Image (cartoon, grey):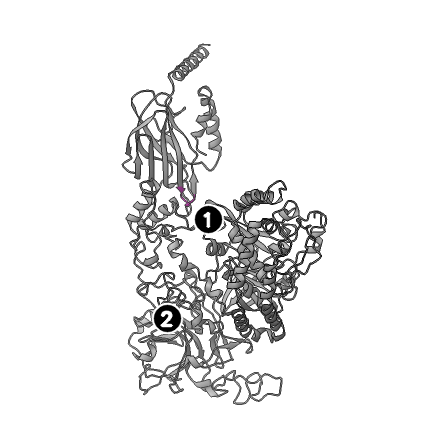
Amino acid sequence: MSAMTRGSVFALLTAVVLATPVGAAPLIVNEFNAVSGSNYLNFGNATTDGDGNSINPPEGEVPAAADTYFGRIEGNGGDWIELVVVADHLDIRGWTLDICNGGVCGGDQLTFANHIVWADLRAGTIITVAEDEPTDLSFDPGSGDWWMNVQAQNGGPGSYITASNFPVNEVDWKMSILDDSANVVYGPIGEHVPEDPIAGCFPPQDNLNAGEIFRLEEAPSALVDPCIPTLNDYEDGVLSTFGSPNRWNSGFATQGFDALRNLESFPDRDGDQIPDDGDRSGIAGDTPCVGGATAGCDDNCAGIQNAAQADSGGPGGADGMGDVCQCGDPTGNDDVTAADILELRELQIGLRTELTRPERCSVHSDGQCSLTDLVVLDRTIGNPSSDPGLAPTCQAAALHSDQSDFMFDPNRLIEVNLRMSQADWDAMRVEELNVFGLITSPLCGTAPFRDLGPPYNFYDTEVTVDGKTLMNVGVRKKGFLGSLSTTKPSLKIKFDEIVGQEKSSGQQLNSMDRMTLNNNKQDTTHVTQCLGYDLMRQAGVPAPRCNFAHVTVVAIDGPTETTVVDGLYSHIDSIKDPFLRRNFGSDSDQGRLYEGTLSDFWPGSFRGTIEAKTQTAADDTSEIDALTTALEDPALTDAQRLTAIQGLVDVDDFLRFWAAEGLIGHWDGYVDDQNNFWFYVDPANDEDLIRFIPWGIDDTFGPGNALPWRSGDPTHAEAIVPRSALARRLYENSVTKLQYLAELQNQLDNVWNEAAIHAEINRMEALITPITGSLTTELNQLRTWVDDHRALVQAEINSPPTGFAGQPTHFCILNP
Amino acid sequence: MHRLRWYVLLRPRSRLLSVAVVAALLCATPAIATQVYHSPNDDGQPAAGPPSLPEGGVQPVYLYIDGGASASAGGTACSSGTGSEVCGYTLTLTGLVGLTLTAFTPDVGADLLYDSNTVELIINGLDTAAPTPGPKRIGELSVNAVAGGSLELTSGEVIGADLSSEILSSGEIVAVPEPGVLLQLACGAALLGCLGHRRARS
């Protein structure tokens, strides 16, 4: 390897190289070639490598090590370095690659020229800098070409990069990336970068040899950090991939670039041209734009247009909250000052009844406006560097933190990979409620089923979602009866669950702390959950969002890794606080949330199986108790009963829910089977009315109730089956019966659009069949059902079936 | 729990003994709730007995707040402190049964914002820069002491060193006894003095 021209900033470079490595950069080192000029990759010769593998091996044997571009050649392409652009629209003009050769730092530099080609690089671009390979800037991401190569050699034109040879080798070789102000933006990375325990920096300590390359073994992102080995995986090896994503693990693992390159997947919800996750880290808002930056960083106010990303309004200046959604600014002048404290104090002592901008009040953790916010604001203004400072917890910044729409984009097929120990997998997959044991137990009906059976346990898992890996995630099985599986279980992923500990890690992915993945066991088409929830939302029902996930589970037993699940799941919105806030504008601290499983508002087992989802909900069940009484009391007239119901239930809301369950054939829901439903005592307007949330719609768009033997069904209709207590009582009332039929007619006329449903089925089929294989037979049955359904429902509306005579018996054998 | 609340529940003659018992209990409890009280000598010490004002004319009430004596040994006060410093509070004081508020002079060193009328005083106090534990003077409230009247803490919230919120129980700050009660107290005191004198002689 030849030496390059010495620079004149030796001292500066020495200081840089000895400094603690810097990560979270917009441009990172991805790979470099340490194979010496006289060696081959993994040593050996032109035809056989050091392990005795041949370039033309017999079938079934491993071939000799070779680069994916150069093949097996002496020197493996000479001196080259591979970089990856992480931040979108990155400008690297004037940026420098600082090389520290053989432990001697300060002499070798390559600077990107002031050329337009470097002015606006897209995230996911691979840049190779090679001494011997001619420049090739034929870069065309639209057709899949994300690679550009630039040649750096003595006597070169210098149009794109310094015209100088440069060394790359295996002896204490390191490099850093400097920006145009000579600030280190990444590195040093290479062999034997010193640790700095005080700074918490533990670079990889690989021992390169002259037959190897050095590469990153994870998806490139802004989270790649040479200081943090748990998130960073630089290794030496012999799988060489000049100009293309790295490969390792005998070629079975390949770097994922989708998260960087799928530009459409990264939303800019306020349309100000600053992506919500501009640094492509996979976590929107983790690197907000400051200091006037508008590229390579996240929108600092993702819900309100602010193209300039102004951020000077925090105490002491920039605080990562854009001025247009500055928390701690109740006066609304985009700046946190003493006037904000005064306004909050005036509110405290009653000199004013409201704040100018109440949505900017909360700077502490609870999102409410309180005396605590005043104290924190006062302290932070007095000492802007105090910890914790102002938090973006006010409503003005709330959009900033909710990026979950991205995760529920219906056009996305999310890639989810779980890695857990074989022992944990074997324990988790067989956990399940013994439902038949439960319904024959004398305790059945005295408590929610979840309280009677063994709990599902969380298991420590490494989770990768679309190339973003999170460690120490809790994963558990889910399911009650029909969806239970020991080979492809439905799953709950809780990103913030630390297995074995009470506390939460606070870990999130795109502002989600959990994912619900249903295995589609009862849904041979795989599409009915997403289709059904979508139609319900169109009908005005607060239904979960849904899209698809390709889930793989790898069970690890020592060196053996076995893929134990590889299939399609439905990704369903979890019924938790973010769902409640989106749909009701409040959460479980304000309202009360319950789940019904074989439950109803009826004395005995139906009432006993209702599960309170929070302590607040358990402490106050007054609406449930009152509604149970109102529905059961035989002495009430229809009018009296309706008055009582209207004081407890949002009846219009329930009529929509009721009609929508029938419309999609959700026989296993509340109205027909008294199962699979949630309800929320909504605190809106201080009315505390019950509102229903659909759940478990994986056996819909099919032939109705599979349990026709259940008592009290006089007609066994398909769409109108008012078996549950609330539906039955409202069906008995001539007024609400007509209102219900009118709502069903409305949904049939305005929501049930066969052409749109067919188009949606076709869209989903194209999206998922690469994973599932052909679904032609199953989906054609669904299409036929969709085509036939309107006539069936219309016939039932025109000639409504007889109502049920009374409450059916409960499934609890001993407590019916 | 607000200490002064106990006085409301007790007859005057049994208060001394009961206060002693309560004080002993409070001393044995590691976490002391924040107190808002009148310090008759304006020295931060609460009254030895039931806090009362003589009837008639304008009388001063020296208001103090005390979250406890423990200084934050770990963390930072008004963030993650472990002590009993008071970082902020909002209090509502109300005159009852004819007791009226005539003036309020906040303590010179206190960072207060307040609003008042003849019946009610609402105070917001902040002390986030370098709060200290122990008694903290709020200011001097002048009241027109009408027999049978009282000054009550009707609502209060305190933010502690760890940013936790403490809702104070409502309770009596001072009371103006009826003349009959005063007479009883005087007799009681004389009786106690007499007994003490006889015991000393024997």
Crowd band around label 1 with a 10 angstrom C-alpha radius: few (<14), some (14–19), many (20+) = few
The residue pinned by badge 2 equals A17
Q: Chain of mark 1?
A: A
- Name the image quarter holding residue B150: top left
User: Element under label 1?
Assistant: helix
Amino acid marked by disc 2:
Val
Q: Which residues are magenta?
A: B159-164
Query: As rendered, which of A601 and A589 lies closer to the eye?
Result: A601
In magenta segment, residue B48: no
Mark sitting on residue A684: 1
For the point 65% across and 59% down, the residue is A717
Amino acid at dot 1: Ala
**Residue A382 drawn at (x, y percent):** 31, 49
Where is residue A722? Give x, y as percent. 62, 54
Q: In this image, A375 relative to A44: left or right?
A: left
Q: Residues within 10 Å of mark 2 (few under 14, many from 20)?
A: many
